[in-house]
């Protein structure tokens, strides 16, 4: 009998999550029946959106998330032992998938690993995975940046932001990026951003007054809060915002539905005629592989660079997750089992 | 010599505007030179957006706005005495336009009155004018409502909202509308809205829980503030918002650029993948007459009904304007000279 290690949500985090909000438990897995496979996690993803899920996941059930896993036992000819998959198994070391769950189009979001050649398999959780597609579709489909336009990206050393910077450059845009440390800023500059500022040492207002005197056409917002409050007045008329995340506010207490603390001021949106679109990357599910194939090609050709911050050990999942809110990661945060 | 009566902005309103914020002054007009015309205001428009302009118009200069005026002296063969125009002359009884200003494409926004047949000429300031086009383009271009979808409109007895209700019905939508009195609600029901509620006696949350259990696909927002705060959580995934105005907040004190009191929550926009677009109707200037011709046809055919609340006397411009914030008007607020 296989016993999986599973991180369950023990209690709802209040403010910044702590290790004590999670609990590591054992879960006995059923044996593999006909058509089933047992997979073993190799890399797991921690992402900011998981903070939002900590408000939704039922207590004492596994935390949700993607992983790269390897088939270690198989009664399914399509998934022989040794093949890899990307799956949304959650924070767990082992998972049994039934024949039905393995069928294409099931709710389990299981997909074979793209052919990454010599690249690390963990890229399937980053630059050639969900974060990559978030950058690719969010920027291109919602901002529709035109060559010569100014694109603003925050959290630009993060898993999504770093790809946004590079795609915007590939499309001929002028890129203004921000990150939260000198090291991060240096890396983002290497990625090709025209201007990078450290929002911890320079106010967004000041930076944009200086760097975008003619305004920002496209804003890819990962951060929200005070950053957006200061950035939005610098948008051009008819500016487009791809509203991807608001990590600066994820640990704020939820005041319920009827709260009014958004930086997206109606009068600003009206007077500048801004188009603001919130999105979740799964809306482009039908074009998922198109995005990944393009990203893979760019990575292979060296046109899109990536970094990963790898935390060793499944036991450290909560720490790796909490680190996201301290800006611990440069590039994609990964846990390696 | 012709002396125009002109309402200038005497001081910046604080909170709700008062009559004392404006001052009636005499202005001596230059004589008509070659190619010039003198026009005399017949109907003037008061609109909520003018509250926003009271933050911008230089003090002791005329308030801005549209009027229907009649050529009363002419040295321009294209504009003989007795012809009518719609022009953005501001709050004034008489205006001299030079040949240059009368040229097509000048910044003066002068246009001949559309052929309204037996309909009142004041419609050019309402259903067949800027507010009509605001409803027409804002709803159709930004919300893109599909037959069978649910459309929410507030200030639905107003100049814009009443037209939105009717266009949405013409497009086969289910319309939920709100207004602020029993009389207004009764009229909006006559316009064809499927459901109308009085937001002063029923909370928006309660109303939408009851009337839109499957969610609102399109929201035409004229009101903002608490209304939007309660309405937005009832949007469907991929809901579209035409952000036209925020009259409930126009009298709030401006806290400067860095205020964070918007109902447009990032997390709500992300989780529901909402598209929110602020707009000013002049963006469709190149298609202006297409909108007006369609609206005129609908009005002539009785498919779009209208009402006007007419205040007699140029001296009462400020009172008519202030009345907008008390909900005094049903349909378009007009001042007749």
Image: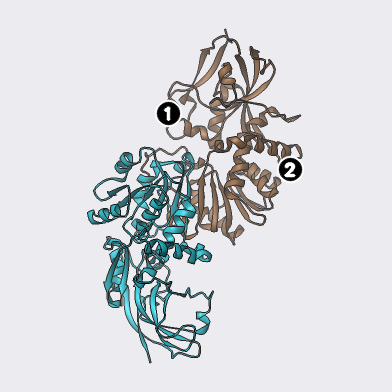
Chain colours: A brown, B cyan
* Residue holding disc 2: A303
Can you say whether B287 is above or below A171 in the image?
below
Tag 1's secondary structure? loop
Quick one: label 1, few (<14), some, or many (20+) residues within 10 Å? some
Q: Residues within 10 Å of mark 2 (few under 14, many from 20)?
A: some
Q: Mark 1 falls within which chain? A: A
The quadrant of the picture occupied by the C terminus of chain B is bottom left
Residue at 43% x, 31% y is: A55
Q: Earlier in the sequence, mark 2 or mark 1?
A: 1
- Note whether residue A159 is visible: no
Taking the spot 46% from the left edge, 30% from the top edge, the residue there is A54
Q: Position of residue A67 (x, y in %)?
A: 60, 25
Looking at the image, the residue that sits furthest to the top is A1
- The chain that hosts pointer 2 is A
Residue A128, percent from left and from top: 66, 34
Q: What residue does disc 1 label?
A: A12
Task: State left or right for residue B93 relative to residue A278.
Answer: left
Relative vertical location of residue A310 with respect to residue B227 in this rendering, above or below: above
The answer, for residue B30, to whether it is visible in the render is yes
In three-dimensional space, the C-alpha distance between marks 2 and 1, rounded to whole angstroms, equals: 41 Å
Q: In the visual, does B226 lie left or right of B240?
A: left
Q: Is residue B246 left or right of residue A213?
A: left
Asked which quadrant contains residue A158, the reply is: top right
Q: Are marks 2 and 1 on the same chain?
A: yes
Q: Quadrant of residue A303?
A: top right
Instruction: Looking at the picture, tell me which residue is in the foreground, B249 or A252.
Output: B249
**In the image, residue B70 above or below residue A46:** below
């Amino acid at each position: 009998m296989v016993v999986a290690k599973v991180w369950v949500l023990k209690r709802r985090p209040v403010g910044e999550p702590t290790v004590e909000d999670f609990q590591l438990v054992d879960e006995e897995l059923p044996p593999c029946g006909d058509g089933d496979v047992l997979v073993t996690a190799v890399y797991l993803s921690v992402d900011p959106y998981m903070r939002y899920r900590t408000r939704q996941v039922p207590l004492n059930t596994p935390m949700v998330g993607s992983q790269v896993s390897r088939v270690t036992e198989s009664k399914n000819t399509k998934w022989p032992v040794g093949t890899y998959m990307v799956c949304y198994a959650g924070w767990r070391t082992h998972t049994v998938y039934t024949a039905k769950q393995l069928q294409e189009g099931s709710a389990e979001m299981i997909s074979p690993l793209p052919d990454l050649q010599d690249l690390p398999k963990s890229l399937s959780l980053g630059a050639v995975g969900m974060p990559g597609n978030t950058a690719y579709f969010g920027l291109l489909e919602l901002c529709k940046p035109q060559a010569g336009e100014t694109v603003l990206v925050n959290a630009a050393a993060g898993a999504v932001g770093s790809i946004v910077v590079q795609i915007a450059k590939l499309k001929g845009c002028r890129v203004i990026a921000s990150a939260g440390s000198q090291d991060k800023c240096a890396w983002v500059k290497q990625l090709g951003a025209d201007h990078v500022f450290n929002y911890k040492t320079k106010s967004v207002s000041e930076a944009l007054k200086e760097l975008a005197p003619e305004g920002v056409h496209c804003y890819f917002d990962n951060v929200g809060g005070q950053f957006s409050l200061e950035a939005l007045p610098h948008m051009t008329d008819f500016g487009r915002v791809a509203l991807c995340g608001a990590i600066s506010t994820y640990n704020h207490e939820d005041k319920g539905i009827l709260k009014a603390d958004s930086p997206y001021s109606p009068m600003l949106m009206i007077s500048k005629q801004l188009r603001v679109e919130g999105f979740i990357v799964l809306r482009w599910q039908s074009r998922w592989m198109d995005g990944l194939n393009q990203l893979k090609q760019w990575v292979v050709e060296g046109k899109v660079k990536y970094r990963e911050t790898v935390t060793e050990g499944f036991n450290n999942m909560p720490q790796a997750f909490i680190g996201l809110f301290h800006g611990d990661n440069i590039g994609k945060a990964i846990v390696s089992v």
